[in-house]
Amino acid sequence: MEADIRDIKLAPYGHTKIEWVKNNMPLLRGLEKEFSETKPFAGVRISLSIHLEPKTAYLCKVLAAGGAEMSITGSNSLSTQDDVCAALVEDGLKVFAYHGATEEEYARHIEMCLEHKPHIIIDDGGDLVGLIHEKRPDLGECCWGGCEETTTGVIRLKAMERDGVLKFPMVAVNDADCKHLFDNRYGTGQSVWDSIMRNTNLIVASKTVVVIGYGWCSKGIAMRAAALGARVIVTEIDPVKAMEAKMDGYDVMKMDQAAPLGDIFVTATGCKHTITVPQMRTMKDRAILANAGHFNVEIDMAGLEEAAVSSYETRKNITGYVLPVDPDDPDGECKLINVIGEGKLANIAAGDGHPAEIMDLSFAVQALSALYIKEHAGALPKAVIDVSEEIDDVIARRRLDAWGIEIDQLTPEQEAYLNSWQF
Ligand code: NAI
């Protein structure tokens, strides 16, 4: 089967969406032009699993322009856009995804995507790599390597490397400066608030926002919350990050202390159960909860569903859970706890994801890292590999060029001075 999508007639809407992001992704446009001329991926099979929306679609088209034979799936069925899938299929690419696929259907799509027997994998959260290692080790034999988009995926790959089970090299795209400094911080910072604001239609100014974690994503989320006029409280487990948050001007405290104070809670840690049901019972009535971490385990959704006496759609993309304050008295006082996008990544499952200009940077790192794997096929260790400094440098310079910004260069004297050890 060549594709598993819902409705090819949606393709015109998808093409328009892809055209919009293309016009705002100068780095990928430049790579598309280069790749079209040089065809560096001719005969190379690439399987990709990333949130299947217009920016990802354009990355797929850029790789295909370079000769790659693409096989594509999403990385979360709620973020898959059917019209975008249809546009890719119309362009001759293989797509296995549709919006709202069940867990079983999603797993089937991942399997179908891998039937392609990829030389290169482009993953977001480790679903493709996980399936090869758990169920289809034979596919690891023909795979030269892959690229991982996000923090959570890289953490898992490093655990696999430590246990000596990683079957092929994986480039940690997330760890490139041109990725996490911009995508995780400014991308998540903006798009999470875009999602919260459009889904709630409420004011952020005057509210107390609790940001859980103070890593790259949470820094952006806290920064934008403060800029919107909120009082920001940060919770952390790392003393250095906690100190950083304090120095950046936020209140820092334990989650148990923050729970009764917040109006809006945003978690972005990569950890599980950062917001627990006992903490939700102490929250204000009508508190709003959003997750920006990769998996829907940060808010204890299973616990909340079990503990709530009822739930209903309070607004599009928001579920309100009626939660008794006292677990032993379900008929007593209750709080309404509002969760955006089922506790999945709020900015992607209930929003448009990162801005196009941000994904331009991240996907330029992906495209050049895929090229790096192709050029070094068979020569790389079965390990998690850093993106080379040259790739970060090239991307940053091209982005500055696109803005029309020139920067200084070291003079030979300055270079000699910086390289000398004499005092
Ligand atoms: P990071 O490693 O920079 O930061 C995570 C922070 O959470 C660390 O400072 C850590 O100490 C803290 N933390 C861990 N457990 C905690 C707990 N129980 N309570 C409080 N703090 C805790 O990671 P980064 O890059 O910020 O990514 C976080 C998550 O967001 C990951 O799952 C990543 O895959 C995901 N992500 C989501 C994006 C989106 O579009 N929503 C974009 C990029 C990453």
Image (tube, rainbow, N blue to C red):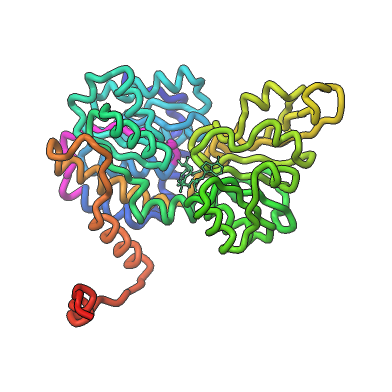
The residue under the point 73% across, 29% down is 321
The residue under the point 16% across, 34% down is 43
Instruction: Tell me where residue 230 sits by quadrant.
Output: bottom right
Q: Residue furthest left?
A: 379
Q: Is residue 41 magenta?
A: yes
Q: Which residues are magenta?
A: 36-53
Give percent across and percent down for residue 319.
69, 32
Image quadrant occupied by the N terminus: top left
Camera-nearest residue between 383 and 32: 383
Apparent side of residue 26 relative to residue 328 in the rendered image (left or right) = left
Give percent across and percent down for residue 7.
46, 26
Q: Is residue 267 visible?
A: yes
Camera-nearest residue between 201 and 287: 287
Instruction: Tell me where residue 55 sits by quadrant.
Output: top left
Apparent side of residue 89 relative to residue 303 in the rendered image (left or right) = left
The residue under the point 82% across, 30% down is 334
Give percent across and percent down for residue 241.
51, 54
Give percent across and percent down for residue 222.
58, 55
The residue under the point 32% across, 61% down is 396
Camera-nearest residue between 163 and 8: 163
Q: Is residue 347 visible?
A: no
Apparent side of residue 295 relative to residue 47 in the rendered image (left or right) = right
Q: Residue furthest right?
A: 332
Image quadrant occupied by the C terminus: bottom left
Q: How many numbered marks have been drawn onto this rendered protein structure?
A: 0
Q: Is residue 386 magenta?
A: no
